Image (spheres, helix red, strand yellow):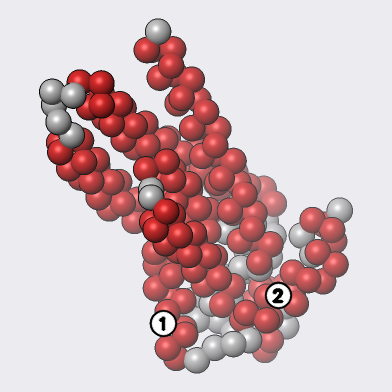
Amino acid sequence: MKQILYDWGGINVWLFHAINDIHFGLLDKFMLLGTEIGEHANFPIYLALLTLVALTVTARTPAQDTARYQAQTLRWMCVIAVYSVAYSLDGLLLDILKPLLDFPRPPLALPPDSVHIVDIAEFHHSLPSGHSSFAMMSVASLWPILNRRWRVAGVLAVLWVGCSRVSLGMHFPADVLAGFLSSLAVVLLVYVATQALTRRLAR
């Protein structure tokens, strides 16, 4: 089963080398920045910025247009709620899956000389990628309030973070994909629950 779902018949390792083998100074710095964007420690900063934007947008909505004002306020509050709850659940899921599965990271799974490592090498708890998970969770949570341009930027940011984890020698592509899918499932679950709760309260 692992050969099919994780190894992908050898494609997982091949794709890892296709990304990780390309490296030079400027690219490494670019990838380090991508990883920094996906740090879980950034959540309070992102939440604060999101709250300020929500306050600005709702404050600009004409107060006399009660229906529009309420809809706009509810929309932003739901996004903030989804982002906050999904962050907590996603972190809890990672805390369970990483030690439970305990997949080896590239420096441990592959010959040391074949892996290009930037920063401090890590050896355990590879699946799923926490940085990739956080990046996907952030963009997916904000998706309902993003216009087309920001959605494109969000998708590119998620791919940047995921690619950086492979480029820096921290994860296999399968770890990144698992992080994307797990956090997306969490966001969808929280979004559906939030929508159901708001409809029930409205009634």
Per the image, label 2 sits on a secondary structure element best described as helix
- Where is residue 32 drawn, in percent x and y? 43, 75
Would you say 9 lies left or right of 18 here?
right
Q: Give the residue number, with chain letter if any, for mark 2.
A: 15
The residue nearer to you, when weighing 34 against 129, is 34
> From what the image shows, is residue 201 above or below residue 162?
above
Within 10 Å of disc 2 (Cα), the crowding (few <14, some 14-19, many 20+) is some
Residue 92 in view: no
- Where is residue 54 drawn, in percent x and y? 24, 40
When asked about the image quadrant of residue 81, the answer is: top left
- Amino acid type of disc 2? Leu
At a point 42% along the width and 79% down the height, the residue shown is: 30
Per the image, label 1 sits on a secondary structure element best described as helix
> From what the image shows, is residue 140 above or below residue 30?
above
- Where is residue 131 drawn, in percent x and y? 49, 59
Mark toward the start of the polypeptide (2 vs 1):
2
- Where is residue 63 drawn, in percent x and y? 13, 26
At a point 45% along the width and 60% down the height, the residue shown is: 152
The residue nearer to you, when weighing 4 against 121, is 4
Distance, label 2 to label 1, CA atoms, is 21 Å
At a point 69% along the width and 86% down the height, the residue shown is: 114
- Amino acid type of disc 1? Lys
Q: Which mark is residue 29?
A: 1
Quadrant holding the C terminus: top left
Would you say 185 lies left or right of 62 here?
right
Residue 60 in view: yes
> From what the image shows, is residue 177 above or below residue 51?
below
Within 10 Å of disc 1 (Cα), the crowding (few <14, some 14-19, many 20+) is some
